[in-house]
Structures are given as structure tokens and as C-alpha cells.
Amino acid sequence: MASPVHDRRCVEGIVAPPTGTGGDPPVPARDWSVLPLDALASIFVKLGAIKILMGPGLVCRSWLQAAMLPELWRSVDMAWHRAVDAERVDVLRAMAKVAVDRSGGRLEVFKGRRFVTDELLHYIGERSPALKTVGLFSCRGVSNQGFAQLIARCPLLEDLHLAFCHRIGGRDVYEAIGRACPRLKRFRLGTRMIESLLASCSDRPGEALGVAAMHELRTLALVGSAVTNDELASVLDGCPRLESLDLRDCFNIVADDALRARCAGIKSLVLPPLRREVDDEDEHETYSYRASDFGFATDCEM
């Protein structure tokens, strides 16, 4: 059984020594509130936006002062923290606005999932002229109009990642990105197969052609896109500096020898497997498997 002395909490600023120390003097409890602001900031920056807003900034006055430093808010990643699934979306939007305000116009990176809306993007765009990286994931509240308004305010943007944002897309939107963001180096687009199928049959035919306007791209991912070989050829002509190309699950791409030769200068290349001739039954089975792989069944249940 543990000694009562060993289990005792610190009392009046003194931490009781563990048993068996031979009578070493007690160790004073550390007062973390008196740490200099630069030391606190170097610790807080490792926590990320959500943890700072929900924790250290509420402890004491000096910690709140450190949590207000604009240097901490150059990167606001609110995409994958567990709070994004646990908190109400209105709370998350309010937290994002606080983070933007604290950045004092120095925000360079913003990533959000699920809770982002057109109104929030407008708020960010008005206050963040230095944005270089934007990532939006499963943001059903963002439309082409709201997204385009943000992009128009991001001339320094270098990295853009859109995944499962089904209301964002179309040739006009991608061309607008190319015009507004001449420094864009990385564009990654993730789409469920069913969304690509619907887009190819609706008012978004040939949307991948808009990517050809992003002339400075080094990295391009069109995962699950409806892009065709002919459209891809136009993209390659418009983006001569491409070093990395990811076309996983692009069901319209035929990865034949001609396409591989066309992509020979690309250092990192991911192509879908070369399609073989299949009968109707095989084709149906293949499509069913891949559609569920992209969460099609989940979407139907929601």
C-alpha cells in the first residue's frame, strides 16, 4: 500500500518529496504564471488554435496575454482536432473568428472542416491579406460565390486543398483561382466518385479545364475527378512546371502508353490502373465497390 506521504498533493507551494529520498529538502512548486511571454508563446504555438482557445488562455492573466500574441495565430488549423466533431458549429465559427482577430492581419494558414460557411470565409478574407494556405474539408456551407470572394482577396495564396466540398467547383471557379492567385504552387482536389459523375452530367462539364489557368503549379492532385485524357492534356499544357501529379480514382482516365509518355517529365506520378475490357456485370460490380469506397452509401443514409 502506498505511503500517505507519497500520495499527498502539494500544500502551500511545497511538493512533498517521495518516500525513500533520504530526507532531501522539499522542492518548491513551480509558478508557471511568471514565465516570460516569449517562453509561453514558444510553448503555446505547439498546441494549435483550438487548444489555445479552450485551455491556456483561460488559466490566468499572463497566460491570456501570451495567448493574444499575433505570432501564435499565423496558422489556424481547425480541421482535424476532435473538438471539430464534438462542438456545435456555431461555437467553432466563433472560435475561428477570435483566432482571425488575434492574428492581427498576419494569418497565413487556415484549415477548417465541417463548420465553415460563406459568411466565415468573408470574415477571414476581409482580415487576412497574407493568406498563403487554405484547406477546406467537407464544408457544405461554402458555395462557389463565397469561395470566389475569398480567393479574390488571396493574391499570395500558394497552397489550396479542397476535399468533399461538393458546392465548390466548375471551370469558371478554377479559372478564377488561376487569375486571382498567380503564386499558387499546390492544388489538391478530393472528390467522391458519385459527385464527379453528377458534375460531369450537370452544369460542370469539363471543369478540370479550369486548372490549366494555374500556370505556376508544381503539385496537382485531382483524386476522384471526372477529368478525361483530353482535358488532362490541356492541363499539362497550361501547367508546364508540374512536378507531382495524382490522378487516383479518376475513372475517365485511360492510363495508356501515350498518357505515360506525355507525363514522362513529372517526377511523382500516380495514375489509375489501366482499364480492361469488361462485360456489363463486371463493370457494375466494379462501380458498386468503388462507389462505396468513396462513401456513397454513407451519403445516401444521411
Image: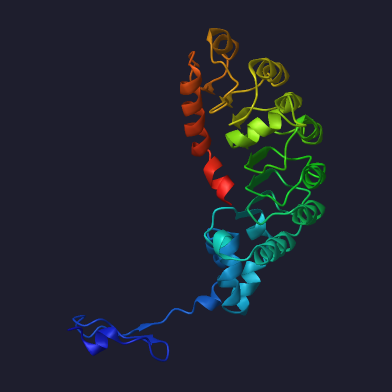
Image location (x, y in percent) of residue 87:
59, 66
Q: Nearer the viewer, residue 123 or 164?
A: 164
State the residue lying farthest toward the bottom: 12
Q: Nearer the viewer, residue 164 or 196?
A: 196
> What residue is at 58 percent from the left and 33 percent from the top?
193
| Left or right: 27 as drawn, with respect to 266 | left
In the displayed structure, 78 sits above or below 151; it is: below
Quarter holding the N terminus? Answer: bottom left
Image location (x, y in percent) of residue 108:
69, 49
Q: Is residue 80 visible?
A: yes
Image location (x, y in percent) of residue 227:
65, 24
> What residue is at 52 percent from the left and 60 percent from the top?
82
> What residue is at 80 percent from the left and 53 percent from the top?
122
Tell me which colouring the rendered structure shows: rainbow
- Residue 177 image-quadrant placement: top right
In the displayed structure, 247 sits above or below 34; it is: above
Q: Is residue 214 visible?
A: no
